Image (cartoon, rainbow, N blue to C red):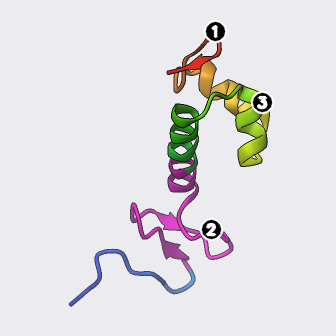
Amino acid sequence: MKRRFPMEEENNGRYCPQCGQRVPRTYRGETCPACEEEELYQKVKNYIQTHDVTAMDVADEFGIPLAQVKDWIENGYFVYRKDQWY
């Protein structure tokens, strides 16, 4: 039986085990960049919901640039008002 998402393909790379998108052989992550960002977003969202934190606290906790957290806020992924995240 053929796999739905083959893990290796000759000279063309491999496939993300979560979404099936092709990932270059040289990429070091287990999943594709889009799936990794989605996973990070979900972790950040959960962290915000369970902790009283600022954008700077989130950036420090996850080792991501403050600009990325602010970008998520500006793009409506999170709403930040008077010390509350939504």
> Could you tell me which secondary element the residue under label 2 belongs to?
loop
In screen coordinates, is 6 left or right of 58? left
User: In this orientation, which residue lies closer to the viewer: 7 or 49?
Assistant: 49
In screen coordinates, is 19 left or right of 79? left
Q: Position of residue 15 (x, y in %)?
A: 46, 72
Q: Residue furthest top?
A: 82
Q: CA distance from mark 3 to mark 2?
A: 26 Å
Q: Dots 1 and 2: beta carbons under 8 Å?
A: no
Residue drawn at point x = 67 percent, y = 29 percent:
53
* Sequence-wise first label, 1 or 3: 3
Residue drawn at point x = 55 percent, y = 18 percent:
79
* Sequence-wise first label, 3 or 2: 2
Residue drawn at point x = 66 percent, y = 26 percent:
71
* 12 over 82 or under it: above or below: below
Q: CA distance from mark 1 to mark 3?
A: 14 Å
Q: CA distance from mark 1 to mark 2?
A: 36 Å
Amino acid at the residue labelled 1: Lys
Residue 43 circle label? none
Q: Position of residue 43 (x, y in %)?
A: 55, 46
Would you name the residue on which mark 3 appears?
Answer: 56
In screen coordinates, is 60 left or right of 46? right
Q: Residue furthest left?
A: 1
> Could you tell me which secondary element the residue under label 1 belongs to?
loop
Q: Dots 3 and 2: beta carbons under 8 Å?
A: no
Within-10-Å neighbours for mark 2: few <14, some 14–19, many 20+: few
User: In this orientation, which residue lies closer to the viewer: 86 or 23?
Assistant: 86
Would you name the residue on which mark 1 appears?
Answer: 82
* 17 over 81 or under it: above or below: below
Amino acid at the residue labelled 2: Gly
User: Principal SS element in the magenta part?
Assistant: loop
Magenta stretch in the rendered image: 12-39
